Image: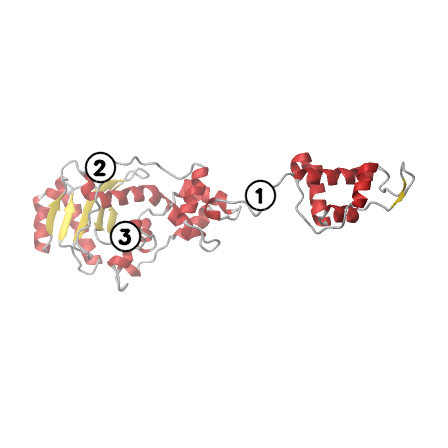
Amino acid sequence: MVTVFTILLGMSNMAHRRLSPPERLELVQLYLSARTNNQTMTGALDDGQQYPRLTVTRLCREYGTSRQTFYRWLKRFREEGHAGLLDRPAGRPRLPNRTVLFPELLPKLIRWRRWLGLSCRQLAEVLRPWVQVSHVTIWRLLNIYGVTGRVYKRRKKRWQRFERGAAPDELWHLDHSKSDFDGKWRLTILDDHSRFVLCCRVVPDLGTAQVCRLLLVTIRRTGGRRPRLLLSDNARSFRSREFRALLTRLGIRATYARVRHPQTLGKLERFHRTFQDNAWLFDPPERFVAYYNWERRHSGIGGQRPAARYWPTKSTVLKKEPVVTTLGKIVTRFG
């Protein structure tokens, strides 16, 4: 004790400096030793000399550190032992791309991804009022928890994106689909250029009469707009004499996909999968079509909304229909 105390008294006052972990341990142990000796170290020691009182201020001055730093090390030492005096990384915790999300948002991100099936781009749009974060950062964060979604195998052959023309109504896609969540058949009509869904309605049967009726209803609802070319598969109702005669009267040319080649109707097949994954959240499910057309951003057309490409003037009959269920309301409902 005499040796250490003598060294302390001989040390000159120095500016604050960064102590190594052994120096921090020495400082803390010296303070605790002084506390053990009746809180003070005043009076004569073995050599008979008188020494001033050893205080925290004097200890910190001799070691070249501040009182605040000393008490922080003392607290860590009492809580964690020697490990509390080791160096720690400075700054706040780092997430991918140095972005820190609010702690209360992370469970909601996982819940929205699992139960709502929202993509990382949609999650970034939902989070925009609270924090600006990239969809890539969200993907990396969700990937840590294993909730990034399905993994699709890369095809051996790289498919080339097909788009007919550079304007709406040059090509419409037509097909039937059956939904797993309600077991109903629907007839869907989609514009190739804008991805705008013109029709998605439940049909009682797959007969020719239903196809002709819904095609006429769709043309009437769009204000008389009709396609130059109508693409469909080789279903009997699409190949029937009555349906082809109707197309001839309307001035529409029919074309058919190659047998056992669903890639020809790939845009419509992709919509069917999106409808299957998300439409059950809407009541009735057909309201998802309004959200898909007017609110949802489509990655296949550069992040635009389908309605912005199909109805650039926004003076339409369909625009007057209210979009009852929005993404924000769904998130609020499940948040």
Tell me if label 2 and label 3 are in contact, CB under 8 Å: no
Say which mark, if any, is on residue 157.
Answer: 2
66 relative to 4, above or below? below
- Secondary element under disc 1, as helix, strand or loop, is loop
Instruction: Give the residue number, with chain letter if any, for mark 1.
Output: 89
Q: CA distance from mark 2 to mark 3?
A: 22 Å
* In this view, the mark in front (1 or 3): 1
**Viewer-side residue, 287 vs 173:** 173
**Which amino acid, mark 2?**
Lys
Q: Position of residue 262 (x, y in %)?
A: 20, 39
Residue 170 seen anywhere in this rendered image of the structure: yes
Whichever of callouts 1 and 3 sits on the residue coming sooner in the sequence is 1
Quarter holding the N terminus is top right
Q: Position of residue 159 (x, y in %)?
A: 22, 41
**Which amino acid, mark 3?**
Ile
At horizontal 81% and vertical 46% (from top left) the residue drawn is 55
Q: How many marks?
A: 3
Instruction: Give the residue number, with chain letter if any, for mark 3.
Output: 301
**Which amino acid, mark 1?**
Pro
Q: Position of residue 74 (x, y in %)?
A: 72, 41
Structural crowding at the residue carrying mark 2, measured as other residues with C-alpha within 10 Å and reported as few (<14), some (14–19) or many (≥20): few
Whichever of callouts 2 and 3 sits on the residue coming sooner in the sequence is 2
